[in-house]
Amino acid sequence: MTPRWSKAQRGLALVSVLWGVAILSLIAATMLTASVTTAYIDRNVWNRTRAASLDDAAVNRAILLLMDDRKHPRVDGAPSNFRFDGAVVRLRIQDEAGRINLNFADKEMLQRLFASAGVARDAAAQLADRVVAHRTLKPGAAIAFRNLDELRDIPGVTPAIYARVTPLITAFGQTTSVDPSVAPREVLALLPDMTPDAITLALKDRAQKQDLPTTSALAIQGSTYTIWADATVGGARVQRVAVVQFTADKANPYLFLGWH
């Protein structure tokens, strides 16, 4: 007859073994999970790196297209897709001459801009006055607004107003008026005498002329473009935004004003 204390020891040993197996299983599961997580992170990092590289290549491709006299890409912000290295990249190019320049726009244009963002008429006029006043406070500076973020410093420009007007404005370039041939629809709507029918005709005419040869950006000193490149690889999405200004200097044909 087996003593009771021996049975108790065997029971305790069995429990210990079961606990040991459970702990080892937990360790194995943890290691497996860590390995899978590491592999997932590595793959995601690789996908993001590849998407960023595709964006960089797309920006350089856009610059080369802008310098080509034979065929000019659309520079009114219209999107286009192209395949590169097995992935689809979405590309947009906006000539900054087609947007409202904070450094040169007159009060009436600025007032219409703020009113289009939902600001009441009197408040829109006050904001326009403050933008103009901000420019006069920097008489020695080449330009008052060096980037769009500086508009946030104007009293009364709320985050909501800033978000609404940002797609329509620029702080780059040297043009004092808006070029309707490359202006987005929303900017065209702010120009004097631009009725809905006139806007529709302008956009239709623009689309028909998109494949015609045009002057290379190299020949226009100070011409400035914002380029958006958007690539997705394996679920990882990366967007590159570059602001490029052409100098008409053959040795240094262009420079980057912004890159993020």
Image (cartoon, rainbow, N blue to C red):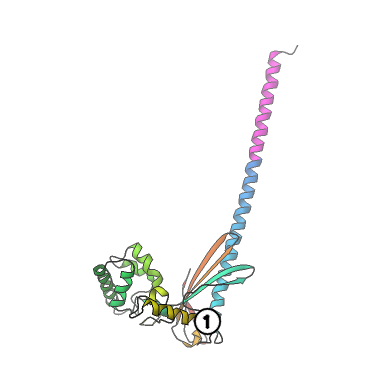
What residue sits right under mark 1 in the picture? 66
Tell me the quarter of the picture where residue 82 sits. Answer: bottom right
Could you tell me residue 84's position as x and y percent? 62, 71
Q: Would you place residue 176 above or below residue 11 in this image?
A: below
The residue nearer to you, when weighing 232 against 76, is 76
Residue at image coords 26%, 69%: 121
**Does residue 169 appear anywhere in the picture?**
no
Q: Would you place residue 136 above or below residue 154 in this image?
A: below
The kind of residue tagged 1 is: Leu
- Identify the magenta region: 1-27
Could you tell me residue 95's position as x and y percent? 45, 78
Could you tell me residue 184's position as x and y percent? 42, 75
**Crowding at label 1, few (<14), some or many (≥20) Cα neighbours within 10 Å?**
many
Q: Would you place residue 51 above or below residue 13 in this image?
A: below
Residue at image coords 67%, 29%: 18
Left or right: where 241 falls relative to 178: right
**Residue 30 counted in the magenta span:** no
Question: What is the tally of numbered marks visible in this picture?
Answer: 1
Main structural element of the magenta stretch: helix, strand or loop? helix
Q: Residue furthest top?
A: 1
Residue at image coords 70%, 21%: 10
Q: Would you place residue 223 above or below residue 80 in this image?
A: below
